[in-house]
Image (spheres, grey):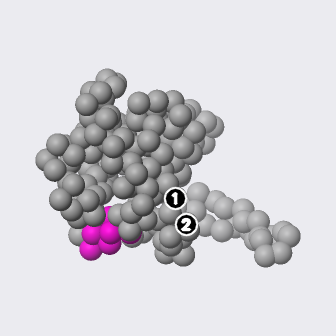
Amino acid sequence: MNALDPAVVAIVKATAPRLARQGSAIVARMYERLFAADPEFKALFNPAHMTLDRQIGALAEALVAYAQNLDRIERFAGSLERIAQKHVALSIRPDQYPVIGKHLLAALQESFGKAATPQVMSAWAMAYGYLADLFIGREKELYASRLEEPGGWVGLREFRVAKRSRSARPRAIFSCLKISPAPSCS
C-alpha cells in the first residue's frame, strides 16, 4: 500500500486542531447521518455505548490521533490493531467502509464550514481511503487466522444455549452448541 502524498498529509494534519475541538460533534453527526440513511448499521452498535464518553468519544479520539500522526502512521498502530480486532468481532465487511466514509466526509464538511475547501475535502477523502485500506488489510489477516483455528469461522453463526452456570455476580457462564453451519470467508 502506498503512503499518502506529503501535501495530503500536510492538509489533514493542519485540520487536526479543528478536529480535536469538534471531533465528538463530527462523529455524532456522522452516526446520525449513517443511521438515517442506512438503518442496518444500528445493529452493529450497542445503543448504551453511543455516548460522548464511549463510542462517539473513542472514534473522535482515534480520528484525531490518526490525523495528528498521518506522517508517522506507526504511532497509530496500537489503535489500528485494537479497532481492527473489534471490527472482526463485529464481522465488519470491506464494502461497509465506503458507506461510513461518505457520512464521515459529509459530517466533516458540515463542521468545517468554509474551511472545507475542495483541497481539504479531497485530502480527507484520500486519508480516509488510506485508513480504510489499512483496516481492510489487517482485518483480512485476522479473518484468515480465525479460519485456521480448529472450529474457526468468519461471520455470524447461530448457537443454542446448552447450559448456564453461575459465576461471580453479576456474571454467568454459558455453554453453547452450534446450530448453523460455519460461514465461509469471502
Secondary structure character of the magenta stretch overall: helix
Q: Left of 79 or right of it: where is 16?
A: left
- Of residues 1 and 21, the one nearer the viewer is 21
- Residue located at (29% from left, 27% from top): 6
Q: Which residue is mark 1?
A: 58
Answer few, some or many: residues within 10 Å of disc 1's Cα (few below 14, many 20 plus, some between 14 and 19). Answer: some
Q: Is residue 121 above or below residue 32?
A: above
- Residue located at (27% from left, 74% from top): 36
- The residue tagged with tag 1: helix, strand or loop? helix
**Residue 45 rendering spot, x and y as whole percentages:** 46, 67
Q: CA distance from mark 1 to mark 2?
A: 6 Å
Magenta span includes 48: no
Q: Which residue is mark 2?
A: 54
Q: Left of 137 or right of it: where is 151?
A: right
Q: Which residues are magenta?
A: 28-36
Can the viewer see residue 118? yes
**Residue 139 rendering spot, x and y as whole percentages:** 46, 39
**Residue 19 rendering spot, x and y as whole percentages:** 38, 55
Query: Which residue is farthest top?
Result: 2
Answer few, some or many: residues within 10 Å of disc 2's Cα (few below 14, many 20 plus, some between 14 and 19). Answer: few
- The residue tagged with tag 2: helix, strand or loop? loop
Can the viewer see residue 125? no
- Marks 2 and 1: in contact by CB < 8 Å? yes
The tally of labels here is 2
Q: Left of 76 or right of it: where is 99?
A: left
